[in-house]
Image (tube, grey):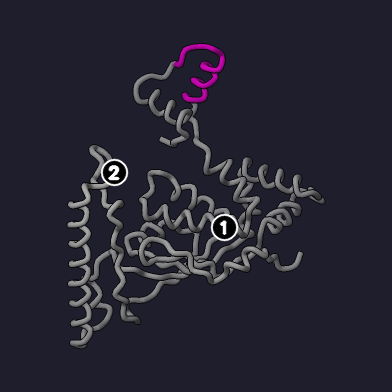
Amino acid sequence: MAHCTVAEAEKILDKEFKVLDKGFVRLVDYLGSDERIIQAARVSYGDGTKTALQDEALIDYLMRQQHTSPFEQVVFTFHLKMPIFIARQWVRHRMARMNEISGRLSIMKEEFYVPDIKNIDPQKKDKLERALEPLEPEEAEKIQKEFKKEQKRSYEEYKDLIERGLAREIARINLPLSLYTEFYWQMDLNNLFRFLKLRLDIHAQLEMREYAKTILQIVKTVCPVATASFENIMLGSVAFNGEEIDALRKVLAGQSNPLTGKKLDRFLAKVKNGIQL
């Protein structure tokens, strides 16, 4: 098979998809498609499948059985712009290649992330996450103004240090984490699905989820069949441990659920809400 191209994907190459107030995701390039996954799988499975339905079934099978190498044949390159505090979470996904704008070589732009009023939330009590329940508008607006004021002050200080001849790599050190950065980021589809599984989860930071949602739509444009399989088998699934599987068998057999306390709460949350706990 020659180089794979996807008509709908060609239309969105280099198009900026806005995320947050000043960020974006841009698909720079892609290598492969659903066809490439099938082609790579057929090397292992002989002549393999011949129809679209059989191809979809094969991709589902690969996903269910965690035969990941055919998905690694598809590669995406993105140009991303995001606040530094999100970028530092992003690089925890180490199965990628990236090149970021340098604050040593460039003058950083005066671009900072300011949360929308509805996204300025209190901390959850006894939890690590924010509550995702907005503060009172008056208090949220006050905090938003404080963000902007401090960002403006820090950038004015940065510019002054640059003008006084201080080295850029030193002048930048007081700039806040809300400053926007940009980088090129390349990852294969298997690891990209794992990234999306984690970063689309309700426990991921809201701002991170917004980027993940946009990337999911782009990946879906390039590999619609594989993405549909991912959404059904990986994204929409939860894992049950041994005790929970045993409990599930007993409940289905009409017996009482042996789980109690927090174990029962986690089990019921998985069954009723599809939430991994």
Residue sitting farthest toward the top = 255
| Residue identified by numbered label 2 | 133
Dominant secondary structure of the residues highlighted in magenta in the image: helix
Closest to the observer, 83 or 172:
83
Please identify the quadrant where the C terminus is shown.
Answer: top left
Residue at left offset 75%, top offset 67%: 2
Closest to the observer, 35 or 12:
12
Give the side of residue 45 with respect to residue 162, left or right.
right
Residue 40: image x %, image y %? 71, 56
Q: Amino acid at mark 2?
A: Glu
Closer to the eye: label 1 or 2: 2
Closest to the observer, 141 or 4:
141
Q: Is residue 260 above or below residue 17?
A: above
Highlighted range, magenta: 243-257
| Residue identified by numbered label 1 | 219
* Spatial CA span between label 1 and label 2: 31 Å
Quarter where residue 157 is shown = bottom left
Mark toward the start of the polypeptide (1 vs 2): 2
Residue 16: image x %, image y %? 48, 68
Residue at left offset 34%, top offset 81%: 106
